[in-house]
Amino acid sequence: MRAYERLQAARDAERPTARAYIERLFSERTELHGDRKYADDPAVIGGIGLLGEIPVTFIGIERGRNLEERIQCRFGCPMPEGYRKALRLMKQAEKFSRPVICFVDTSGAFCGEDAEERGQGQAIADNLMQMMALKTPIITIVIGEGGSGGALGLSVANRVYMLENAVFSVISPEGCASILWEDAKLAADAAECLHITAEDMTEFGVAEDMISEDFVHFSRMCESLKERLVLDLKGYSRTPGEKLAEERYQRFRKLGRWAE
């Protein structure tokens, strides 16, 4: 499949959303709400639960499973209070030594006037800075579209996984084509130039591994993902918090390095 075909697959309305993964992976869930400053953002869901026998904090960007939910979630475009809620839950996880597992599926943070008035850029920047120093393991799974800073706000992790048809990009191919060539119809060409696929991301070191998709047998797929996550968290269980933060920092410092 070409890059733009994978993007279309990532945007498929029938694709499982973050809530579907959370319901399959975690037992004894308690969902938590609000950023304690302004409001609760339905586009970002989070709480605590058990991954097997491991207590974890889960956070996901939710697109919505039907039209009513999608409108409520702004089709998976978080507001500043969504990112602040996510950070509140991550700091809580650090306090109680719980790992954090994030699910990313967004075309980008909401770009309306009200979002800007409430500090969208600062909310995302705070997440990037605070996640870099968080003294607990963070694992992020890109389950669909990973668009720009809206996706990065939950992707400063020790390990990043991507589903095989997921994408990760600094800008949408349509936006890129409109800016560079003044023609959004050239989005397919832009997608190839941007190198947005899971294969590209693993090759560049942005993601650690690619996860096969099997939505027909979704329960089986989630069980396999659960086993992988449990193994990862057991491997991190004896790593000091300071070392986890340093490893995460160095992971991002080396991205983009090259030599001739």
Image: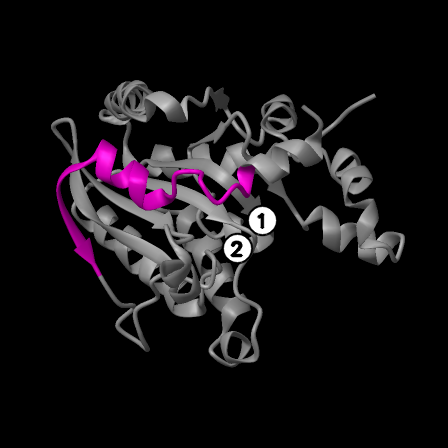
In which quadrant of the rendered view does residue 213 lie? top left
Residue at 36% across, 42% down: 102
Q: Which three-letter amino acid code belongs to the residue tagged 2?
A: Gly
- CB of mark 2 within 8 Å of CB of mark 1? yes
| Residue reaching furthest to the right | 181
Disc 1, SS: strand
Residue 136 seen in the figure: no
Residue at 16% across, 41% down: 49
157 on left or right of 260? left
Residue at mark 2: 150
49 on left or right of 1? left
Task: State the count of labels.
Answer: 2
Between 141 and 237, the residue placed more toward the observer is 141
Q: Which three-letter amino acid code belongs to the residue tagged 1?
A: Gly
In which quadrant of the rendered view does residue 254 lie? top right
Residue 155 colored in magenta in the image = no
Question: The C terminus appears in which quarter of the rendering?
Answer: top right
Position of 15 relative to 204 (above/below) = below
Q: Where does residue 8 sit, x and y in percent of width and height?
A: 61, 39
Position of 167 relative to 74 (above/below) = above
Residue at mark 1: 147
183 on left or right of 85? right
Disc 2, SS: helix
Bin the neighbour count of mark 1 within 10 Å (Cα to Cα): few under 14, some 14-19, many 20 and up: many
Q: Where does residue 189 sit, x and y in percent of width and height?
A: 82, 38
* Bounds of the magenta segment: 10-32
